[in-house]
Structure formats: structure tokens, C-alpha cells
Image (cartoon, rainbow, N blue to C red):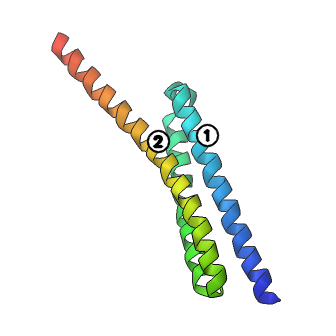
């Protein structure tokens, strides 16, 4: 009984962190779509630090869960979390692609400005 409660608590904690990560990534993506004027750089940096911290916490909780849970539960959980992990990776990749496009645009603009000086 105590083991079941412990497993449920760990699953709830992981689910909560997953929700926070998705929420922050979605908000970050929306702010990027609206343009950099809607969010100052410090706030953006803070959001990114929070996302990294949550991802690290998530990883720690998942590793602990997989080590302590019964094998059948751990296997089922791992399969479900793999899907969640893939969604997180996709969302982060979109943000990375956006950042890459912004840097490319900046570099090209800077080169054009130097050309006309």
C-alpha cells in the first residue's frame, strides 16, 4: 500500500513537471511569434533557465522512478514518457530553429549595413 502511494506521488510529480514544461514552452513560443518587443531579454533568459531546471528535475524524477518501480510499471511508464519526451524535443527544436533563423537574419542585416556604409 505504501509503495503504491509512493508510486502515485512520483507519477503525479512527473505529470506536474511535464505540464509546467509544456506551458512554459508554449508561452515562450507564443512570445517569439509576437516578436521580441513583447518580452524583455531578462524575462526570456529567466524562462529558459526555469525550463532547463524543470527538465533536469524531470530527468531526476524519472530516473528515480525507473529504479524503484516494479518492472512492469516502469516499462509501461517509460513507453508513455517516451512520447512525452518526443513532444518536448519537438517543441524545443522549433524554438531552436526560430533562434537560428533570427541569428541568420541578424547576421545578414549586419552584413548589408556594412556594405552600404
CB contact under 8 Å: marks 2 and 1? no
Instruction: For marks 2 and 1, give the CA distance.
Output: 11 Å
Write the residue at 64% across / 84% down.
72
Quick one: which residue is furthest to the right in this view? 1
**Residue 71 sits in quarter:** bottom right
Residue bearing the label numbered 2: 95
Mark before the other along the chain sequence, 2 or 1 = 1
Please name the residue shown 74% across and 68% down the image: 12
Horizontal relation, residue 18 to residue 12: left or right: left
SS assignment at label 2: helix
Q: Which residue is mark 1?
A: 27
Q: Is residue 51 above or below residue 36?
A: below
Q: Nearer the viewer, residue 81 or 8?
A: 81
Residue at the image position 62 percent from the left and 66 percent from the top = 80
Residue 65 seen from this side: no
Q: Nearer the viewer, residue 47 or 75?
A: 75
Return the mark for residue 101. none
Relative to 64, is 7 on the left or the right? right
Within 10 Å of disc 1 (Cα), the crowding (few <14, some 14-19, many 20+) is few
Query: Does 32 appear above or below 8?
Result: above
Q: Is residue 105 above or below residue 12?
A: above
Amino acid at each position: 500500500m505504501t509503495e503504491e502511494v509512493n508510486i502515485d506521488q512520483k507519477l503525479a510529480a512527473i505529470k506536474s513537471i511535464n505540464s509546467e514544461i509544456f506551458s512554459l514552452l508554449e508561452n515562450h513560443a507564443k512570445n517569439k511569434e509576437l516578436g521580441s518587443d513583447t518580452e524583455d531579454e531578462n524575462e526570456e533568459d529567466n524562462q529558459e533557465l526555469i525550463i532547463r531546471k524543470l527538465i533536469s528535475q524531470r530527468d531526476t524524477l524519472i530516473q528515480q522512478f525507473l529504479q524503484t518501480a516494479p518492472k512492469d510499471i516502469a516499462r509501461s511508464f517509460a513507453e508513455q514518457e517516451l512520447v512525452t519526451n518526443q513532444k518536448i524535443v519537438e517543441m524545443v527544436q522549433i524554438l531552436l530553429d526560430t533562434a537560428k533563423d533570427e541569428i541568420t537574419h541578424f547576421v545578414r542585416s549586419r552584413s548589408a549595413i556594412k556594405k552600404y556604409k
